[in-house]
Image (cartoon, coloured by chain):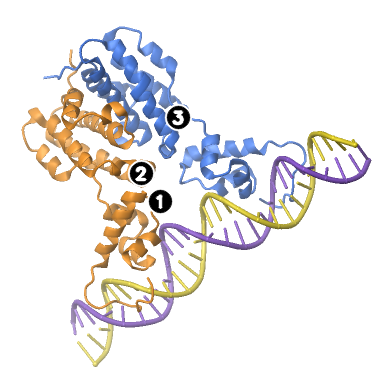
Chain colours: A blue, B orange, C yellow, D purple
Amino acid sequence: MLNKTRGRPRGNPDTKARIARAARELFLTHGYPGTTLRAVAAAAGVDVALISYHFGSKQGLFSQSLNLLCVDPTALDQALRGNREQLADRLLDSVTGLWDAAGPAQSRMVVQDDATMRALRDYLDGELRLRIAEFIGGPDATRRATAAVAVLGGLIFTRYLNPIRSVGALSPADVRRVFRPALRAALYGRTPA
Amino acid sequence: MLNKTRGRPRGNPDTKARIARAARELFLTHGYPGTTLRAVAAAAGVDVALISYHFGSKQGLFSQSLNLLCVDPTALDQALRGNREQLADRLLDSVTGLWDAAGPAQSRMVVQDDATMRALRDYLDGELRLRIAEFIGGPDATRRATAAVAVLGGLIFTRYLNPIRSVGALSPADVRRVFRPALRAALYGRTPA
DNA sequence: AGTTTTATTCAACACGGTTGAATACTGCGC
DNA sequence: GCGCAGTATTCAACCGTGTTGAATAAAACT
């Protein structure tokens, strides 16, 4: 942006990567609407127009700079292997383990991105639900799996995607404690007295 | 907006209500970011500045024009009055009653924008959670209320906001059946065997 | 009647993302 | 080596956004 002689610079400074890195940082800390292209440009020491040049649009910058992971398949594999008794706890741990590891910042702007939403939806409704149904078995397995997926979706939603304080403030251990009854009820279908 | 002689107009034309009505319509069809204040002003036949004057900010206009609570308030009042035994069912009905009535239009565009998410979050974490906690009482009332709110949030999320097929396809009666165990477990804290 | 309060328009501001032109470097074919 | 297409970069402007201050006219109050 400043005085850096017009035209192409010498050497091969990979500015596109620098922009992406700066953008990632800002998106994570300030969210999508709270991040301005000019701020990204300043952080990368570059003119604003260069962003549009490299990434096309702000949405493009978002998609390309932030390749966000949604679900960790290996954690699920382990969760769906042990005894039925602690299935609920293992499922809860595999959720908190993944998202909490990604840092508390991951959540805010994720909501903006429609592609991410669809990925999450497809995963919940497809693979996760089917595998849970297969694992628990018995009558009404699919119905109970649907309920379980909805509970897990509720956890993800209220803790990470659109975090409400009372849920976001819980420790992973608290998450277990709080969600275990609901998830077990969903999984095993019995209504507690 | 155009030529309508400056200064206060004659009579008592309740323009604030007219603005709110126009805003409601536009917000519902175009979403929050897709609705511009100038468009609202045009639809209401009014100057842009008048909106800031009456509602303070765009967010204020949104909050005040569109009182979208995620739970039907009158239904909630009734739900929080009867016997404890069927509280879960009444809560579920008050959710489906509101959202299913609003039609599938309500959900689509709503998902993207931050303002709606915040409104939803505030409501879930604030009023709803507190009132549920107050109603159920007993030890760990707030913790159980948190769990219950998360389950309801899961229902709203997986059925309306980012609808997954297996949950969206349920009839309201099915919603009861599927979610009752989890919600009751959340409310009463006992883990079913 | 006179003064304050309220409702309204107008004009401008600051800032957002995006675009077109100018410029300087790179990499290629000869 | 030289010329030339392509590419990376800055600059200056555009248009649309939400918001603000001044001007103005009716209403409400004393």
Specify the amino acid type for callout 1: Gly
Dot 1 falls on which chain? Answer: B
Residues packed near mark 2 inside 10 Å, few (<14), some (14 to 19) or many (20 plus): some
Residue depicted at 47% across the width and 42% down the height: A32
CB contact under 8 Å: marks 1 and 2: yes
Residue A153 at x, y percent in the picture: 32, 28
Give the mark toward the camera: 3 or 2. 2
* Visible residue check, residue B137: no
Q: Mark 1 highlights which residue?
A: B34
Q: Mark 3 highlights which residue?
A: A103
Q: Which mark is residue B109?
A: 2
What is the distance, in whole Å, between disc 1 and disc 2 at their CAs? 9 Å
Both labels 1 and 3 in a single chain? no
Which quadrant would the C terminus of chain B be assigned to in this image?
Answer: top left
Relative to B180, A88 lies left or right: right
- In the displayed structure, B40 sits above or below A120; it is below
- In the displayed structure, A67 sits above or below A180; it is below
